[in-house]
Amino acid sequence: MSQNAQIVMDAVRAADHDRYLTALYAPADKRDALFSLYAFNAEIAGIRDRIHEPLPGEVRLQWWRDVVATGGEAGAGHPVADSLNTSIAAFNLPKPAFDNMLEARIFDLYDDPMPSRIDLEGYCGETAAALIQLAAMVLDPVEAPRFAELAGRAGCAQAITGLLLLLPLHRKRGQCFVPVDILAAAGSSPEEFVAGDGGPGAKRAVAAMIALAWDHLSAFEQGASALPVSLRPAFLPLALSRAYLTKMESGSPLDGVTRLSALRRHWLLLRRAGKGWPAL
């Protein structure tokens, strides 16, 4: 492994350990490309944590747009940028998917409320679902297009689960990913949800978000038995989503971060990597 590849892999291991573990189940000749995708995703998802003002955050997102658009001229010498451009060229990955991902991440930089469930699902589609589809294209470009719709369901399930896992952090900084229409149906509002204990409607809103994640996860699992072995590593993060959601139902994400033990995560990934998803 080159020094650059080691740096990228270590970045994923530190920033997104679940996806790091899933990439280890991919063929050796595909892992560097998966790590480059996951490192890029971690970089842009973590911009708000590193850059606390929106405008400098947008400048950083534009820098990544230039990296992708120039195919290596911008960002030369940056390990993740170099690795990403190598992967885009080697696997003929569509650059518009990266542009859409970067555009969606602008929302992360501000405290504007998520307008509706449709907007939330669009956000999930352009971030987590796009990442799954790009990983699938790396793993098996022939089979990947057949499962684009399944990637959409998988991405929504994974992303909504991830937003629930990050709920304590988001509320602490006054950010609300729970859509306004879901909050209104629960008798709450974005302002009330992020203040104090979230108000009387907070638990109902969280329960609705968990139900939405379950809806997408169930739709994914109904079609997942058809996934070829070659594509399983791209969808492996979904092996953990069910366990996270089950745990959330017994302990609200409002009360703290939901965690799975390392042993539990390893076992779930190993089982799905070996057996896939059974037919429902």
Image (spheres, grey):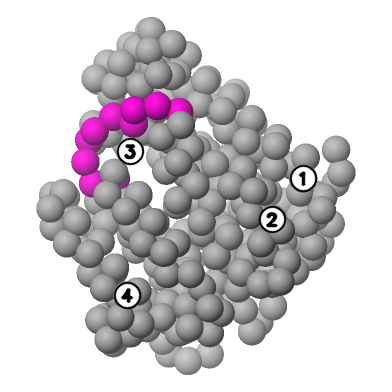
Part of the protein shown in magenta: 108-117
Q: Amino acid at mark 3?
A: Leu
- For marks 3 and 2 on the same chain, the one whose residue lies earlier in the sequence: 2
* Residue at mark 1 to residue at mark 4: CA–CA distance: 35 Å
**Label 3, label 2: how far apart the Cα atoms are:** 33 Å
Residue of label 2: 147
Q: Residues within 10 Å of mark 2 (few under 14, many from 20)?
A: some
Q: For the residues carrying marks 3 and 1, which lies nearer the camera in this image?
A: 1
Q: Secondary structure at mark 2?
A: helix
Q: Quadrant of residue 171?
A: top left
Which of pointers 1 and 4 lies earlier in the amino acid sequence?
4
* Residue hosting label 3: 169
Mark 2 → mark 4, Cα distance in angstroms? 27 Å
- Residue 114 within the magenta-colored segment of the rendering: yes
Residue type beneath disc 2: Phe
Please state the horizontal and vertical placement of residue 57, each as a whole percent of the image: 19, 56
Classify residue 247 as left or right of residue 93: right
Residue at x 55%, y 65% (from the top left corner)? 134
Tag on residue 69?
Answer: 4
Labels 3, 2: front one = 2
The residue beneath circle 1 is 223
Picture quadrant of residue 212: top right
> At label 1, which amino acid type do we have?
Gly
Q: Give the x, y percent position of residue 272.
A: 76, 55
Residue 67 visible (yes or no) = yes
Question: Residue, x 67% and y 64% (percent of image)?
Answer: 144
Report crowding for label 1: few under 14, some 14 to 19, many 20 or more residues within 10 A (C-alpha): some
The amino acid type found where label 4 is placed reads Ala
Q: Main secondary structure of the magenta part?
A: loop
Above or below residue 162? Residue 196 is above
Q: How many marks?
A: 4
